[in-house]
Image: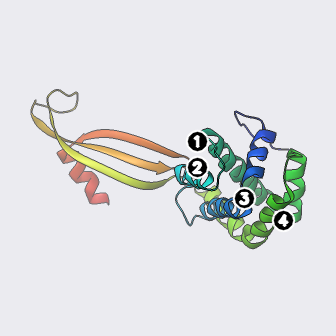
Amino acid sequence: MIIMELSTDVDAVVGNIGKLPSEVFSETCHEILLHLQGKTSAVDLVENCNKFQRAGVNLDWKSAQDVIRLLSFHFRSAAKSKLTADHLITRLGEASSKWTKPALQVVHQLWTENASFVQAHQEAQAMASIGQLVDIQWKLGMAVSSDTCRSLNSPYISVLMKIADTSGEITYKSFEMTVLQFKVCHNYF
């Protein structure tokens, strides 16, 4: 059996899922499934946290993140093991006794509708395990001192990339380059 690493225990996370109205829980599951099918670049934690609060369930961002991670883990695991909806529900029940019947019904319905798409995408992604560029920002600056620029007062480009890794986590990578390096890099895009 696969063990999930969470900073809180699974029963507490499942308890938080049980507090969500079925419609909100369904929307969150659907968003996760769309991400796992490669149709969205990431699951928006801030939007989901706000959605939970608008529905009257006040979860901090860490608790909302744990909900998303737990669901993503189980959907990803079910896809890897090619589980049917019934087997997924059984596995969820084995992991925690705190699941509510409405939550399990939502999972069952959505997994029945989306399992084959998630499985296909997860198999393709396993062959090419790379992240996805979500956003890139750059700005031109003037170097006052630098290890790579030959003289002071040389222009440089500062780049910030927003990347969604294969699990949906967003990371930021930043670096600087000379204008010449940027022109060479730009030719590849």
| CA gap, disc 3 and disc 1 | 18 Å
Residue type at mark 2 is Cys
Q: Which residue is mark 3?
A: 21
Instruction: Pinpoint residue 49: horizontal percent, then vertical percent.
Output: 58, 49
Residue type at mark 3 is Pro
Q: Which residue is mark 1?
A: 61
Mark 1 Cα within 10 Å, few/some/many (few <14, many 20+)?
A: some
Q: Is residue 90 visible?
A: yes
| CA gap, disc 4 and disc 3 | 21 Å
Which badge, 3 or 1, comes first in the chain's sequence?
Answer: 3
Residue type at mark 4 is Ala
| CA gap, disc 2 and disc 3 | 14 Å
Quadrant assignment for the C terminus:
bottom left
**Disc 4 and disc 2 in contact, CB within 8 angstroms:** no
Q: Which residue is mark 4?
A: 85
**Which of labels 4 and 2 is toward the front?**
2
Q: Which residue is mark 2?
A: 49
Residue type at mark 1 is Trp
Q: Tell me if residue 11 comes above or below residue 23 in the rendering.
A: above
